[in-house]
Amino acid sequence: MVSPQGPPRARPTDMTTPGPLLPPYGVVVGVLLHLVVYLVTVLYRDDNKIKKQDAPALCDLHCCKDGPVRNGLIGQKPPSISPERLKDFGEEDYLNGDVKTWEMKIVNHNEELLRDALSRIPQSSSRTSLSSCNKLIRFEDISAAAFKIQCGVQKTPCMYSRLSKQYGMDIYLKKEFLQYTGSVKERGVLYLLTSLPQDQQRKGVIVASDSNFSMAVAYHASELRIPVFVIMSTSTSPARVKMCREYGAMVISYGTTAKDSQTHARRLAQENGYLYLEEEDSAVYLSGLGTVGLEVYEQVPKLDAVIFPAGGHCGLLAGSAAALKHLNPHISVIGVESDSFPVLQQSLKAGHPIEDQACSNHDFYGDVSGLCFGSNSLQLTGNLVDKVVAVREEDILISMLRLLEYERATVDADGAIGLAALVAGKLPELKGKRVAIVICSGNLELHLLQQCIARALTLDNRVCRFSLVLSDCPGDISKLLEILAREEARVLDIKQEQTFVTSELFTVEVTCTVETRDKTHTAQLRNTLLERYPTAAWTER
């Protein structure tokens, strides 16, 4: 019997296939994005850590806009020295407890680290032979230095001087005393410090003197955030110690002389990782100083001659001569030194630096009386400088007076010695020519300022003193004062002596100090007084 339901139907098959084993596409993209963000964050944090450990570049310090700008630099306060750096310091009483000194351990890597900074300048020792010194500084090195320090030092003006008519030539004064520390040494020091390796910049530097070089190191090292220590003798003037501390350096008083502090610094420098710096004629330092020659050539067209201070520290003369002679070999380069310390002339004559030349420790002379510090600058001077002249101390004082009167510039002996060559008449061949004079320094101690000006007025025949004997009668001194008023002489001081007079009884010896216009006026006053008082005696200067 056939079933009415018909043939059996096939079983329905399941049309759904099993899903893939991977997650959906959107989930994958989201995970990848989170991973990328995480990696970028990690890398950014590591990069920040590395940047914080590295010392900032020069232009980052000098040219950014965060904070007030001072002398082309950012007015950022250098970081204080951490207590860990002072762990080797020991406080001790010095001079019966009147002076506190700090002892520290510092290492000296000498010039090797400086020379490694400029690999293109081969140097093998701190004192290079005369035969290889021409390879140490090139015009390209000076140009590179000018580019690197342009944000850190002033481009000082080179202005036409009112003294031109008095000396019969066009005089232009390059006013390097307007640098922040008052000295041209800033140029070489800044290039020196920025050429140091970064690890050495983090460790710090040390100097041992109270010279313009040390002041420049103190200031620019602090601005570059390089720890800096300055060792000064206890005989250093308090004003210089205070100024150096204000620049940002740690000042340590040690020893009674500059030699004691230098010896102590070298001994300490052999025990730690600090770099001991002293003013030498390395290619780096000379290149920085040579940027003065570049600026003078740019600022004064059609120059005939440039006058520089010389002496033992002739790095400015040598470096600038290299730049000027490259740009125009016809420009005369002239150096001026003191005839009391003719270090450069004697060294050139001997063919090597004179090390046993006597020098003065008086604050007035400064770098004028320094020893010749290297054969490199000496060789450059011998090859490139046209003339070196020597001037007297009297000429230096009068040139200081001229700059104060005509240029309102208070400079020291090192800054005034270039003009002293014209005051002394040592360069008659420059009459009618265009001449630039580098005024390199203005760090004159206040206690010396009054002495120098008073002495210069006397040497210039503008302050004179005389004594005469008058009868001790009413009206005699008033008659003397009437003569002085008629001759337009200004009375600065007048004294009377009655007790210890060796002449007749009832007489008084009168001593007068007066100010006159010039030498002619002084001679006229002297003749007038001798006519009225034949026994008048003039005090020779």
Image (spheres, grey):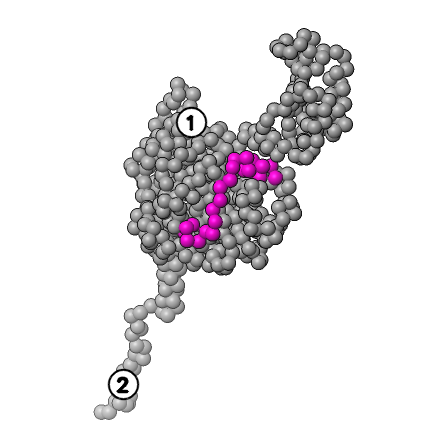
Q: Residue at x 31, y 43 (%)?
A: 109
Q: Residue at x 59, y 32 (%)?
A: 459
Whether residue 225 is visible here, answered yes or no, is no
Q: Secondary structure at mark 1?
A: loop
Local packing at callout 1 (Cα closer than 10 Å; few below 14, some 14-19, many 20+) is many
Q: Position of residue 297 (x, y in %)?
A: 53, 56
Residue 57 in magenta? no
Residue 384 in magenta? yes
Q: Which is nearer the N-term, disc 2 or disc 1?
A: 2
Q: Is residue 462 depicted above or below 95 in this figure? A: below
Amino acid at the residue labelled 2: Ala
- Asked if residue 39 lies left or right of residue 288, the reply is left
Q: Position of residue 442 (x, y in %)?
A: 54, 39
Amino acid at the residue labelled 1: Thr
Which residue bears the numbered disc 2?
A: 10
Q: Residue at x 62, y 42 (%)?
A: 407
In the picture, the disc for residue 234 is 1
- Asked if residue 340 lies left or right of residue 161, the reply is left
Whether residue 479 is visible here, answered yes or no, is yes
**Residue furthest top as drawn:** 505
What are the residue bounds of the magenta stretch? 380-402
Q: Is residue 390 depicted above or below 381 in this figure? A: above
Q: Position of residue 365 (x, y in %)?
A: 48, 35
For marks 2 and 1, give the CA distance: 117 Å
Q: Secondary structure at mark 2?
A: loop
Q: Residue at x 38, y 62 (%)?
A: 36
Within the image, what quadrant is residue 218 found in?
Answer: top left
